[in-house]
Every structure is written in structure tokens, then in C-alpha cells.
Amino acid sequence: MVVRIRGRALPSGEHVDLCADGDRWTDDPVPGAEVVEGWLLPGLVDAHTHPGAKNAGDPLDEDLLREHLADHVDLGVTAIRSPGLAGDPPPWFGTDPGTPRAFHAGPWIARHGQFFDTWGHHGDLADLPALAARQARRSGWAKIVADWGLDDEPVPADVMTAVVAAVHAVGGRVAVHTQHAGGSAAAVTAGVDSIEHGMWLAPALLDQMATQGTALTPTLSGFERHLPEVEKKPDGPRKDWFVGGVHALRDLVGAAHEAGVRILAGTDSVPHDRHALLHEIHALSHRIGPHEALGAASWHARKYLGLAGLEPGAPADAVVYAEDPRTDLDQLEHPIAVVLRGQRVR
């Protein structure tokens, strides 16, 4: 049955009345359409998720991948970005009915001796630009691990610059994992497309990020979840790095927003938590307010990925709530309808 959505649409709050024409919204009325009314979002987005693996280092499990994607959709997530997967995804990934639209970077790319041995492609520094370009040619994105252990050397700025040039030359984009000052500085200098985590990223780099369009996906709630446990551990360099880094990241999110950096909501969800995106929206709302936190998980993220919002001609995705979710973020746990590719899936 054709779906018709009607109500106030975020971010503007203006009234819209749209029908699904296949996988596109139209403002032309369709007789007999199923009408769903309420407060409308153009679909949630988890911009940093790793579905299909139970624990870090595990191989990609196709059954688990479907389970994780179903959890996403049940919550109203109609698009995901996976900057790193446990393996090459199956052909149906991102296209099967009832599963979110998907953007991915394939397996991670890291230098030898860093990251998980059983995950990703590893190479010498000189290999990274070619590895990244090859992946971006296949999927549109490449993910570079810029730094890892406390004593590891980060990928140098000149190598990162070569990675960005090689990926952009094939029409792709570069996401970078960084949790140390050196890796984040190299990533910003190179002009990467998104920084993942950004712990210890220097605030002085935010203006450059805003100017060149480098997004920040802080995955703040994932770090905050572990903070109480880490704070109880004996003092030492790793504890200092983590605890200090979480507090710095909290402040960085607000400063990044004020500087005009695009903030994306991502969960870094390994092990999987079906409510992880809600936790991230709550964490971001404490730094940038509920409106912008929702935008980071919806309209801002969709625009970044090339997906239009609730307007004629846009992809027919929507999540519907009984009231304005900005006034009570807990409503996000209970959507009254989820529309994906023009079909009501909840």
C-alpha cells in the first residue's frame, strides 16, 4: 500500500504532506494511500557503525549483519555509514528491502603493527595511498587508521595527504580514525573528509576543518560509557590518556559546532547495542542542544551523504513520532512509524 505522511517536518517544523511514489516522495495525492500523521524526521542516520561482528576482531557474520541492520531500522535508522567493516559486505548490503541505505569504506586500512591483526588491510606507509584508492574505487569511501597505541607513530601528514589525493582522484572520500593529537593534526592538514572520534584533536584546528568541510564524528557516548570503569583503574599513562581525552572531547564537540564544523552522530557499535544511537543523540544534546543533536543524526547527516530530506523528489524515508522529539528525546525509542524506500517497515 502507498504510504502518505502528514505533519510537521524537521528541521523547519513546517507542515508537509507527501506520498511515496516508489522510492521518491511526491506532493501529488495518491487515492487510497495509508496516512500516517505526526512529527516527521527524514530518517535517522548512524554515521559510524560496524554491523555484522559480535566483538572487535571477529569475522563478518552475514546472519548477524542482518540482525544488526534490522535493529537499526526498528529504531528509525534508514541510512548508515560504516567507516570500516569486518569484511567485504555481501551484494545485498545497503539495497535489500527492509535494510538501511548503506555507505561503507570496506575493511579498515592500517599500517603494519597497528590496529587488529584480523581486521582490515595492512601495509607499509608507502602502500596506504594505493590501498585507499583501490577501496574507494569499489565503495566510494576508504577508512585510514591514523594512530593506534599510545606509543605508536601516527601516519605522517605527507602520507595522509597522498592518501587524500589518491582517493579524491577516483571520486572517493576519506574517513580517518584518530584518537591522538598527531594523527588528528595530520588528518586535518591533509584535508580528509571526516574525522572519526577526534579524541585529543586540537581546538585550533577547528576553523580549518570548517573551511575545508571536514566533518567530525565524535562517537562521544561510546567513550562516556567506559569512563566510570576506567576512572577506577590505577593511575597510569593509558588512564590519563582516556580520561583526559573524554573530557577534552566533550568540550571539543561544542567548540566544533560553534566553529561551523559539521557534527555527525555515530555509535562505533561493537559490540552491538540497538539503542546506541539514542545514547549518542543524548550525549550530543548536552553539548550542542537537542535540535542540532537530532540534526547530526538525521538531516545534517543525510545531506552529508547526499540524501535529501522531506521534499518532493527526495528518497522516500521518514520516521514519525507522536510529538516533537526535540522536547523529549526519549520519544526516539518509540517511533509510531518508519518508512524506508517508500515502504512502511514499522
Image (spheres, rainbow, N blue to C red):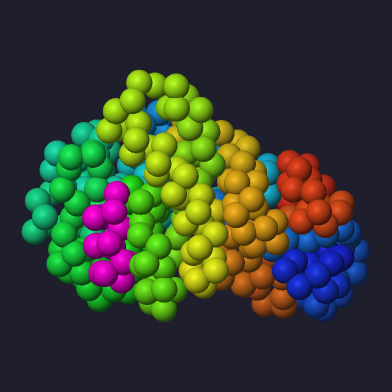
Residue 325 x, y percent position in the rendering: 78, 53
- Residue located at (18% from left, 40% from top): 151
Residue 222 x, y percent position in the rendering: 49, 39
- Residue located at (40% from left, 41% from top): 244
Asked if the magenta segment contains residue 183, the reply would be yes
- Residue located at (64% from left, 50% from top): 286
Residue 219 relative to residue 79: left or right = left
Residue 285 relative to residue 213: left or right = right
Residue 156 relative to residue 192: left or right = left
Which of the image's four quarters has the N terminus?
bottom right
Which of 106/2 is in front? 106
- Residue located at (23% from left, 39% from top): 150
Tell me which corner region of the image, top left, top right, bottom left or bottom right, holds residue 59: top left
Residue 248 appears in the picture as rendered:
yes
Residue 79 appears in the picture as rendered:
no
Residue 77 relative to residue 18: left or right = left
What main secondary structure does the magenta stretch of the protein show? helix
Asked if the magenta segment contains residue 151, the reply would be no
Residue extending farthest to the front is 235
Residue 149 x, y percent position in the rendering: 23, 38
Residue 184 x, y percent position in the rendering: 30, 58
The answer to whether 188 is drawn above or below residue 104 in the figure is: below
The answer to whether 285 is drawn above or below residue 31 in the figure is: above
Identify the magenta region: 180-193
Tell me which corner region of the image, top left, top right, bottom left or bottom right, holds residue 39: bottom right
